[in-house]
Image: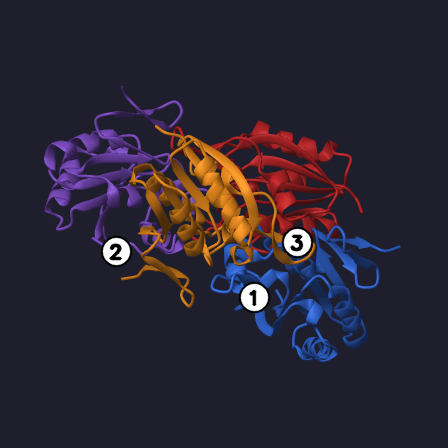
Chain colours: A red, B blue, C purple, D orange
Amino acid sequence: MDTICIFITGGTFDKTYDEIRGSLTFKDTHLPEMLKLGRSRVEVSIRTLMMIDSLEMTEADRALVVHSCAQCSHSRIVITHGTDTMVETAAALARGVIGKTIVLTGAMIPYAFGSSDGLFNLGSALSFAQVLPAGVYIAMNGQHFSWDRVRKDRDTGVFEATS
Amino acid sequence: MDTICIFITGGTFDKTYDEIRGSLTFKDTHLPEMLKLGRSRVEVSIRTLMMIDSLEMTEADRALVVHSCAQCSHSRIVITHGTDTMVETAAALARGVIGKTIVLTGAMIPYAFGSSDGLFNLGSALSFAQVLPAGVYIAMNGQHFSWDRVRKDRDTGVFEATS
Amino acid sequence: MDTICIFITGGTFDKTYDEIRGSLTFKDTHLPEMLKLGRSRVEVSIRTLMMIDSLEMTEADRALVVHSCAQCSHSRIVITHGTDTMVETAAALARGVIGKTIVLTGAMIPYAFGSSDGLFNLGSALSFAQVLPAGVYIAMNGQHFSWDRVRKDRDTGVFEATS
Amino acid sequence: MDTICIFITGGTFDKTYDEIRGSLTFKDTHLPEMLKLGRSRVEVSIRTLMMIDSLEMTEADRALVVHSCAQCSHSRIVITHGTDTMVETAAALARGVIGKTIVLTGAMIPYAFGSSDGLFNLGSALSFAQVLPAGVYIAMNGQHFSWDRVRKDRDTGVFEATS
């Protein structure tokens, strides 16, 4: 089995609660803990690129994501990402990376809240990344979408296919 | 997107704690609750075939699973199953059902324990079921195995490829 | 056993995550769910006075809390409250209500995060309210403090006795 | 504030799931983790006396509990205990220990299940132990009972006062 490269960029997935300030914040990623909880035996290489809300992702940040995927020595990649601009980053990846299977995923509820869709999505994204042909995909809500045929419905928080 | 047929047979996945007797038991399946928690938008048809420990699964039980998969009007199927005899049921399905993608999955920790690998495995199994070609597979630990090339290591609880 | 009057004012205790906006907010109180989870058999009468961050509590809000405690037909009262101004409200209650046992409590982590100190504090506050003599108290961190001998250490989030 | 002595005897409180055998078992106590989660600042001294189902508690085990409470240098004690024979142990303590405040508590659901009444009961028991006069008590369901005026209703799992 090929190693899967996991790049972390933050997003709701990794939001945590700062109990001194009483607000949401980012500290360390929960990904290794989630893989342990899921008893994952998939060979992965994890690297945190940034830890930000995807609404604050700049073009420079996005270029770093593209560059990291292009440079990575593995051809199967999972990226955890905020849902608000996931489609934009997917488009940038489709323009900048060729011949790799890249799956972006995220969460609507922080994993730290104990009732997250993140664990479900992570199992889903890792699985799609192992079997889909080269291309850029979004894996959310148990489904996968090609990067150029998906949008997030801001009112419901659901990803859906565009015609 | 095709509807996926989900058959429930019990297993650790659905074990619950009987607080009057102080022991593990089966009541209703947690599957709908898990799909809701995962914010799954995959079209599914759920049917509970039995609610048992897979060590107690008889040949008649196994025949019912095979029959249900053969009769089901959909060609993509996920089965939740105890891990102890999952490989035996997979072999029976390979002998009895042709031309369908069948993915068996389970859990090492009951979902009701709040720290289950079940949610991760469910996301994984639903994803593999959508993209793998016809065949019978086991999806555990984030990986998938063809039914005839897998064993459960009873000492570690991990599923691994056989050569 | 006397009925205990529970007044809800919001605070971290009841913060929830708005998955569409990606921010913390207030919806309904989690108190009945928490009492059920704790299998509480204490006779209680629950009333939500407001649902706010205690930093935004005005003098009018505080007057409503005092008035509600004075008017309540029971002599034992628990108040859930944000921790930032809990001491101020306790002082207002000490000035305005006589002859009742009033226990304020709260949480450092929202209950909805699944890893909250709120359930522990609720068990503690309800217990202190049943046995302490008339007076105004703060119950946090498993301890109780008289209203005029406690401060919150803003750096650590811990309540401690003042000399 | 006086140090509270906590004696652990096992019970549902500390049951855990053995994922290799698929059954309930005892390993280490969850008590330190629970106190940390509750952000408890109560000074405690914790000692595990045994780790058993209270239905299997022998007279020798019970004598050890009594002896430990009598010898302990602190006058306020909390004991975690299975609920099935909690009342018997309380009676043995009332006969064997004088002049101390002893509070027994337990849980209907294992803490490891993530939805336990244990955290609520622990907050309650620690609080009662700080303020009740010398005597032997059971703290369950948010209430406290004198050792000689309580029974467990085996059908509902609830502790109730006897007349």
User: In the drawing, does residue B34 fall left or right of residue B57?
Assistant: left
Q: Which residue is mark 1?
A: B25
Amino acid type of the residue that numbered disc 2 sits on in the rendered structure: Glu
**Which element type, helix, strand or loop, lies under badge 3?**
loop
Cα separation between marks 1 and 3: 15 Å
Q: Secondary structure at mark 2?
A: loop
CA separation, marks 3 and 2?
A: 39 Å
Q: Nearer the viewer, residue C137 or A147?
A: C137
Numbered disc 1: secondary structure = strand
Quadrant of the rendering where the C terminus of chain D is positioned: bottom left
Q: Chain of mark 2?
A: C
Q: Inspect the image, locate mark 3, and give the three-letter code of the amino acid beneath it.
A: Glu
Q: Label 3, on which residue? A: D19
User: Which of the pair D115/C25 is nearer the observer?
Assistant: D115
In the rendering, which numbered label is found on residue B138? none
Whether residues under marks 1 and 3 lie with C-beta atoms below 8 angstroms apart, the answer is: no
Q: Residue at x 32, y 49 (%)?
A: C27
Q: Which residue is mark 2?
A: C43
Q: Nearer the viewer, residue C69 or A17?
A: C69
